Amino acid sequence: MRALVTGGAGFIGSHLVDALLARGDDVVVLDDLSTGRRDYVDGDATFVEHDIREPFETDAERVFHLAAQADVGTSMERPGFDSEVNVVGTVNVLEAARAAGARVVFSSTGGAIYGDVDAPAREDSALLPVSAYGLAKRSAEVYVDGWNRIFGAGHVVLRFANVYGPRQSAALEGGVVAIFLERLAAGEPTTIFGDGTITRDFVHVDDVVRALVLAGDHPGGVFNVGTGTETTVAELHELCERAVGVEVPPSFGPARAGDARRSVLDPSYAAAELGFTASVALAHGIATTHEASLQE
């Protein structure tokens, strides 16, 4: 299959590129390297440096759209920039795919698009984002749904929980696992924003890549990609301490604008329709993430 991966030099995208190449696909990576790294792109993939805020062309059969502005803090400080990347960029991807007759798998967010939840969010739960990032992803989903209706496309939306794993950058606030591991390993102080009881659904990048590959063969729909398990940020910090082999209590700072207090996804629909179930246990995933960081 001819596949295009936007954001393919980034955290999730580079792992997906590796998986697609391993099964024999012809892969093109489209990335502006604003947060991605050229050395993450396997030499067997074709690399094209491009900003998705500008139109482009492709001859791919599948387009995996992972390029995004994914930092909640940046979205609150620069909502116009966030919408340019996440909304206008998605429209450009949809138009390139439409011209090529390609199907799109769009990486959305479950962690931000549902907002605060009272129970594991289902795909038909209310969409009540509390950040500009969540609002932009919701808007982009509307375009994906519209292109499916208007043009008869079979695009798929995957709503990711909080993804973690090797190659995640500690420079972005969303990479809380990477941040904790890096600072604990360096003997630097760590900070939890809020009282530590904020919960998230942490899903390993290997599981996310499996979901992306499965979605590439599906004729359309919206699916949560998570574990269905909540973990508090305080519990996460303890798991990171254990992986590094230290006991260093964090400090606590004020809660940040745009952070939902409770976020967890119901992954049962993806299990039924895609055959996807997350398999990497959090403690194991954090430990192997730390081991991988020592080898970089």
Image (spheres, grey):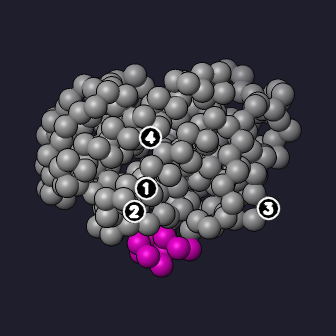
- The answer to whether residue 280 is magenta is no
Q: Nearer the viewer, residue 152 or 228?
A: 152
**In this rendering, the label closer to the viewer, 4 or 3:** 3
User: Which residue is disc 2 drawn over?
Assistant: 149
Q: Amino acid at mark 3?
A: Asp
Q: Which mark is residue 166?
A: 4
Q: CA distance from mark 4 to mark 3?
A: 31 Å
User: Which residue is disc 1 drawn over?
Assistant: 146
Q: Amino acid at mark 2?
A: Arg
Res. 268 visible in picture: yes
Q: Nearer the viewer, residue 80 or 281?
A: 80
Q: Which mark is residue 118?
A: 3
Question: Which image quadrant: the N terminus?
Answer: bottom left
The 10 Å Cα crowd at callout 1, few under 14, some 14 to 19, many 20 or more, is: few
Res. 20 visible in picture: no
Q: Residue at x 81, y 32 (%)?
A: 255
Secondary structure under tag 2 reads helix
x then y, percent, for residue 199? 74, 50
**In this rendering, the label closer to the viewer, 4 or 1:** 1
Are the residues flagged by discs 4 and 3 in contact, CB closer than 8 Å? no
x then y, percent, for residue 229? 66, 62
Secondary structure under tag 3 reads loop
Q: CA distance from mark 3 to mark 1?
A: 29 Å
| Magenta region | 268-276
The 10 Å Cα crowd at callout 4, few under 14, some 14 to 19, many 20 or more, is: many
x then y, percent, for residue 223? 50, 64
Question: Which image quadrant: the C terminus?
Answer: top left
Residue at the limit of the structure toward the front, as seen here: 150
The 10 Å Cα crowd at callout 3, few under 14, some 14 to 19, many 20 or more, is: few
Secondary structure under tag 1 reads helix
